[in-house]
Image (spheres, rainbow, N blue to C red):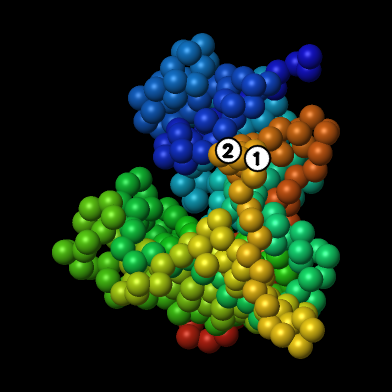
Amino acid sequence: MAKKLKYGIIGCGGIANGKHLPATKRLGDVDITSYCDIIPQRAEEANIKYSEGKGKVFTNYKDLLKEELDAVCVLTPNNSHCEITVAALNSGKHVMCEKPMAKNYAEAKVMITASVTNKKLLTIGYQNRFRPDSLFLKAECEKGTLGEIYYAKATALRRRAVPTWGVFLDEEKQGGGPLIDIGTHALDLTLFMMNNYEPAYAVGTVFHKLNKEKDTGNAWGDWNTKEFTAEDSAFGFIVMKNGATIMLESSWALNTTRQREACTTLCGTKGGADMPKQGELVLNGCKNGKLYNMNPLLQAQGVDFFDGDADKFTDLEARTFRDAIRGKGKLYVLPEQAMVVTQILDGIYKSAKTGKPYYFDKEQ
């Protein structure tokens, strides 16, 4: 049996407990031996729950990085992704960093350089690529079913679902609001399906229209209007170098009934695809002179009266990272791809501030 890998967790908050810790624990051949959080209680509770109290607990990530570890998961606020990831790579660890890759394009480039220099793996937590609908659609895109994809829409719209915990509302620590938080997932899916990572320019608009409301109807309770400095919605118009166009829409709070998140719509020369919501997929086109819609059955099917459970896509994400570390597979989310997502988001924010298109060729 292969020797167990040793992981360290930096940041033991919601995304750690909601995704990375349980998925890593279920791998079976990975030991989580180190936990770090600036709130000691969080690290201690995670250690008890996922390592039976046998791991080490730290409040400073630099101390954790002194441990003998194969990999580190960086699950902290966005403004520390670059600093901690680079330090981890420099200390000889492979890194899984939560999305978005960084607050801005400049930081993302520094992370790439550290990965290449140290010859260590770096991947970003875009788990929506591993959903059954996403995997099916990617396979169809690679086969050319849609032809040349020249128009797409990346959608991440919430009506009233503003995260009120942690530092989500803090524009400085997060780098933004829904655009960088959930818009990043929709954009990543869209670029990945198009296999197009060469943006020409972007036009962006950012709104602070509802974040000072007090009677909110928010899913997680009323937000603190003084703390809510990030935008409540943001929209982007992106033109790629080959002329392909992407509309990106994101919101935490928006007066709409049309809600869906981490979804993409693709229009190509041979066919199209739409994700009505996560887990659903409709392919469309024209055959034999007739229009058609095709809805693939994405759930695993077994014998009568039994529907097999498809793998949890968060588990597939964790397995893929582990297998790449062991040399038994490749990363599915490449840092170079995630860097372009950050580059475009950065461009949308810059366009919104200036009121002018942002041209990516002008970047150094």
Which amino acid, mark 2?
Phe
Residue 270: x, y in percent?
A: 77, 80
Which amino acid, mark 1?
Gly
> What residue is at 77 percent from the left and 81 percent from the top?
287
Residue 311 shows in this picture: no
Which SS class for mark 2?
Answer: loop
Q: Using the image, tell me which numbered label, if any, was put on residue 270.
A: none
* 10 Å crowding of disc 2: few (<14), some (14-19), many (20+): few
**Residue 118 or residue 266, whichever sits in front:** 266
Q: Is residue 174 left or right of residue 316?
A: left
**Cα separation between marks 2 and 1:** 6 Å
> What residue is at 77 percent from the left and 37 percent from the top?
324
Quarter occupied by residue 242: bottom right
Residue 89: x, y in percent?
A: 69, 37
Residue 235 shows in this picture: yes
> What residue is at 64 percent from the left and 27 percent from the top?
27
Which SS class for mark 1?
Answer: loop
**Residue 74 or residue 293, whichever sits in front:** 293
Q: Is residue 227 left or right of residue 302?
A: left
The quadrant in which the C terminus is found is bottom right
Q: Is residue 136 left or right of residue 154?
A: right
Q: Using the image, tell me which numbered label, if any, was put on residue 302.
A: 1
> What residue is at 62 percent from the left and 32 percent from the top?
72
Quarter occupied by residue 230: bottom left
- In this rendering, the answer to whether 198 lies above or below 170 is below
- In this rendering, the answer to whether 347 lies above or below 82 is below
**Given contact means CB atoms under 8 Å apart, are the residues at marks 2 and 1 in contact?**
yes
Q: Using the image, tell me which numbered label, if any, was put on residue 306.
A: 2
* 10 Å crowding of disc 1: few (<14), some (14-19), many (20+): few
Residue 301: x, y in percent?
A: 64, 44
The quadrant in which the N terminus is found is top right
